[in-house]
Amino acid sequence: MVPEAGEADLVLRLPIGERPRWQERAQEFGFHFHTMYGEPYWDESAYYQFSLEQIEKHIEEPTEEIHQMCLEVVAKVLEDEELLRHFCIPEQHWDFVRSSWKNGDPSLYSRLDFAYCGQGPAKLYENNADTPTSLYETGFWQWLWLQDNVDRRVLPLQSDQFNSLQEKLVNRFRDLQFLTPGRELHFACCKDTEEDRGTVQYLQDCASEAGIANHFVFMEDIGCDADGFFTDMQDQVITWMFKLYPWEFMFREEFGSLLGTNNVRWLEPPWKAILSNKALLPMLWKLFPGHPNLLPSFFESELDKAADFPELVKKPIFSREGANISIVRAGDVQLLSDGPYGEEGYIYQAMHPLPKFGKSFTLVGSWLVDDLAAGISIREDENMVTQDMSRYLPHIIL
Amino acid sequence: MKRTKNINLARMRKGRGVSFVLRPLAIGVAAALVGCSSDEEVKVVSSVEDCVDNTQLDEVQCEAAYQRALEEAERTGPKYANLSQCEAEFGNCRESSSGFWMPLMTGFMVASLLDNDRRHYSSGYYNPVYRYSASGSRYYDRLMTADGQVIGRYGKSSYTVDKRAMDPKPKVTKTVSRGGFGSVASAKSSWGGGRSSSGSRGWGG
């Protein structure tokens, strides 16, 4: 059953006037991807309103708890070869991933996606632990939106937002500098994606604010020298790198064979390959069956246990932006979204539709910086699967 | 309050219309380094004798510091494919063991005030500095570190530098191959079944 908005103690979706000339403000702050393919991505014609209790009890607490549960999964998977195969980690990289975990390589951030309407427990859809985006929109741009609307008296003075993302990122970078002495930080993402470049630029700004000397190089431009050290376009050796590029891709690429041989510290660390993987979901359900924030989830090999569920969502082990999702009803497969993923296999998750506000299905992204809950982002889509054409809406706490 | 208390808007503001300009290449003369202004007074010494006469280090320590600076220079110094490029910027150059042309180290930095910890040569970094000598450049006759940070005009008795100038600089090497990352993304983006086929969306999620 899809809950309808408007009842007491539901999250509210409220219309609001756009800030006059906000597009100029976006230009001023270098937010270049608010409109994509001619469609709005940033949408400030409405906002979501949460109560403080909803935020603290239903999102903040479970977010930090689930993160700890996820870390238990990492520890378990890394000591079990069969599980490493289930997670499709190539065998030649097992030591690389394991030693990053054993060394306690620090992490920066992740985003848990929840279905949440304001009542009852938020249900975890997935963990974007390796390359989460919509970071700038969350940490800075929606923060500025609230500031501007309070300043122009459109929102009440006491309006707040669950969004300490930027503050926590800067503080985390300070910690990371202390944990990674004597190294300069290279940032990388792929060419031709304004959104990824913007996300990385934002992280560079946060790192600079923390006093970290940093550089940028495109993934495709990374080089190596005769000793197997990675280099940037100035032939400077890379010793510490943030990459907005999935581990599962890097493992399978030419330079993947150099990983672990050339003394690079990585953000996110290699052990995040376990968490950004949809195989995490059936593992969580195995270790924490019946947890109120989890949806029952199964590996392909355990589908017999899923017989009680009339509807299952079939997700590829590796996928981004909601691609290649289908619904299985009594063995009948209905494709919800197409895409280039799925060759590594699938997992199955009990159907739990996103809440609908008016015409929009709404997904709550809950951010973590290291192990601290740091804020939320709201995405809306006309379709049940939140994809890369979904819109971003701001929120307040009142 | 559940949100960030304060954001440095000046840092977040981007130049009008300028998306992402990469830093200039070559040695990347750093116009301004970001960050905290924790300044430190340093001496730039050009030899072991100069070091003994003008710093708190004794002769053994100066000798060790000089050796370390030479090693640092080999590791991190500006590197050029040919002699003329190097000479155009730094005047006096030599060929390194790895086959590059590199400017001669003009001297190395020693902090003016040394506590006991830092006086111990093994714990200190003695960064080499180079004298930029391209005539007509606004950096003419300036001393700079390997990453292009300007220390000041050549020949002063002491310099005030950002503490970061004393940090070890990244190693520079010879790249033998590029393009070993990115192939999976490029294969997936050629998939044309969805609205995202224009490819401008990224690989995050």
Image (cartoon, coloured by chain):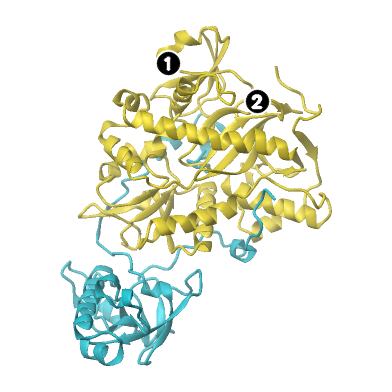
Chain colours: A yellow, B cyan
Q: Nearer the viewer, residue A295 or B83?
A: A295
Q: Quadrant of residue A344?
A: top left
Q: Is residue B137 visible?
A: no
Chain letter of disc 2?
A
Residue under numbered circle 2: A354
Q: Quadrant of residue B137?
A: bottom left
Amino acid type, callout 2: Leu
According to the picture, the residue beneath numbered tag 1 turns out to be: A300
Residue B24 found in image quarter: bottom left
Up-down: is A302 above or below A124? above
Residue B74 position within the rendered picture, expressed as x and y whole percent measured from the top left: 22, 71
Left/right placement of residue A222 relative to residue A116 reads left
> Mark 1 or mark 2, which is nearer the start of the sequence?
1
Q: Residue sitting at 63 percent across and 35 percent down?
A: A59
> Residue under mark 1: which chain is it in?
A
Q: Is residue B172 visible?
A: yes
> Is residue A171 placed above or below B39 in the rendered structure?
above
Please identify the residue farthest to the left as the structure is shown. B97
Of A32 and A152, nearer the camera is A152
Q: CA distance from mark 2 to mark 1?
A: 23 Å
Label 2, residues with CA under 10 Å away: few <14, some 14-19, many ≥20: many
Type of residue at label 1?
Glu
Q: Is residue B104 above or below residue A169?
A: below
Q: Nearer the viewer, residue A166 or A205?
A: A166
